[in-house]
Amino acid sequence: MKKRGRLEIIRDILKVIQENRNSIRQTPLIRKSNISTSKFKEYFKELLEKGFVKEIKGDSGERKVTLTPKGFNFLEKYKTIVNFIEEFEL
Amino acid sequence: MHNLIQGIGTELIYSFVIIVSSLMIYYSTKEMYELSSYKGIKYFRQAFLLFAIAYFFKSFIKILLVYFGTSRILDINIRYMGSITLFMFMFFGSLAVFYLVHSLMCKKWNKKSEIVLGVFYMISILISFIIINTREIWVFIGASLFILAIAIFGLYLTHKQSKEKKKKGSMHLIYTLLFLFWILNIIDVLIQIPSYFYQISLYLASIGIFLTILYKVLKKTGSN
């Protein structure tokens, strides 16, 4: 299996959130993103800092992760970014 | 008088097109970099910002040469104006080439990437100092060929890498032409070639390369 790059991992994490009606707890997010917990923590910190995701409290008080408009924008532009990197051989 | 206006006019139009193209490349990739934080995109867009600065100094030098009616920028001694402008032009120009090479190579260099960039800065400063402290044509040509050699070597390495990964890419030829014509632009500043046809051909080819890159960038970024 091909090793995923940084951008691909970010896309996968954000996509899992989006596909779960934009609200998911951290534990299933880690499992569904197919990534180790330590790696997830690194990426999750980056996603929070960049404002791609935010943490909210669910109806029963549990902490959930949700996408911000910037996170949706990343998912929308992901293909364009990857195509650009490939075209310009960066 | 007519030749003076014609010379300055041609220079201004040429620089304007290149500077605007470079800045458009820089700004149209801004969102893409902000979203991805991808280093290759960062150095790619900074390379074009540096090209814009270098072309600004190039046009300034050429206008000074036409205005003072001299063929060598270092002959203009008003408060070291000639030396300072030439230094800026050489520094930003060399750095632009190195940044573009770096944008292609930084993934491969990974953690050594910052060290390599530091080396590129030092080489650019060194070359610029050598250029302003000499009047020998062979030193000018040697320095220009040295920059070109580093650029072509960087391109060769990335080309080899993309061949191994069987990646299809059409940019190597454009990058090679960009580097080649940038070197001819440096030589155009350092050694005056008294041929209007040569100048116009050089300018048109350089504009063509920048507009091709701009077109590809706008097409890929989806900017209008």
Image (spheres, coloured by chain):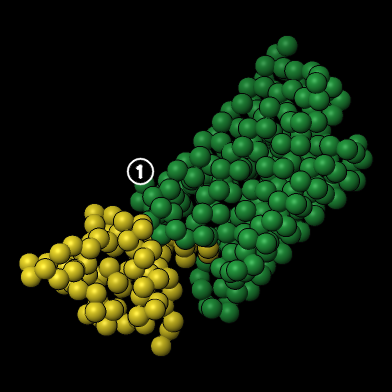
Chain colours: A yellow, B green
Could you tell me residue B53's position as x and y percent? 61, 37
Please say whether residue B128 is visible from this viewpoint: yes
Given residues A47 and B34, the one toward you in this image is A47
Image quarter where the N terminus of chain B lies is top right
Could you tell me residue A56's position as x and y percent? 18, 62
Could you tell me residue B10's position as x and y percent? 64, 26
Please say whether residue A19 is visible from this viewpoint: no
Give the image quarter of residue B172: bottom right
Image quarter where the C terminus of chain B lies is top left
Q: Which residue is mark 1?
A: B224
Given residues B32 and B165, the one toward you in this image is B32
Give the image quarter of residue B80: top right
Q: Is residue A68 left or right of residue B154?
A: left
Question: Amino acid type of disc 1?
Answer: Asn
Furthest-top residue in this view = B1
In the structure shown, which secondary structural element does the residue marked by tag 1 occupy?
loop
Could you tell me residue A81's position as x and y percent? 40, 60
Q: Is residue A66 left or right of residue B124?
A: left
Q: Is residue B116 above or below residue B68?
A: below
- Residue under the image location 48 percent in, 45 percent down: B25
- Residue under the image location 58 percent in, 28 percent down: B13
